[in-house]
Image (cartoon, rainbow, N blue to C red):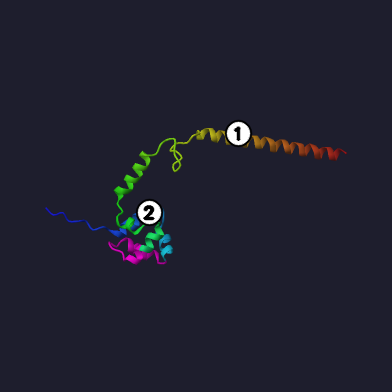
Amino acid sequence: MSTAIKQKHIGRNISRIRELRGMKQEALAEAIGISQQSVSSIESSEEVETKRLVEIAKALGVTVEAIENFSEESVFNFFNNFYDNSSSQGNSFNQGMFATFNPLDKVVELYERLIQAEKELVQAEKEKVEYLENLLKK
């Protein structure tokens, strides 16, 4: 039984990290001074030259090792552990996973403030009209 080691596809790792960072190929291309087509070519390559890999890592805000050792499983494990270790009360890094207010109450509050502002505006207009009418009578 053969236990061949699967070759890591560096280009695919770059592509996935870029996508996870919410970056388009055009933005990465601009950051490292190449064309979007070149980024596409790099992302389809199994290997990337070290100099270019360093530039890409810097543009993506990760280390070269992070690109070389990237795996989908590690990303999911990170987020699962982060969520599992997060308390609902929060801490200095994580301010909690749940809102401490009812969003519907906030909508009602904003609507009431809008109505109050409208009432004040109407009252101010009435006073203005009354003032002008008094001026015309004199």
- Which residue position holds label 1? 112
Report the front residue among 34 and 114: 34
* Furthest residue toward right: 138
* Furthest residue toward front: 92
Where does the C terminus fall, quadrant-wise? Answer: top right
- Which residue position holds label 2? 19
**Percent coordinates x, y for residue 36 in the rendering:** 39, 64
> Is there a contact, CB below 8 Å, between mark 1 and mark 2?
no
**Percent coordinates x, y for residue 129 in the rendering:** 77, 38
Residue type marked 1: Glu
Q: Which residues are magenta?
A: 33-53
Residue 131, compared with residue 71, is above or below; it is: above
Q: Name which residue lies at 58% across and 36% down.
A: 110
Instruction: Report the label total.
Output: 2
**SS class of the residue under badge 1?**
helix
Q: Name which residue lies at 37% across and 42% down.
A: 82
Is 68 magenta? The answer is no
**Label 1 or label 2, whichever comes before in sequence order:** 2
Report the front residue among 128 and 98: 98
State which quadrant residue 52 falls in: bottom left
* Furthest residue toward left: 1
**Percent coordinates x, y for residue 85 in the rendering:** 37, 39
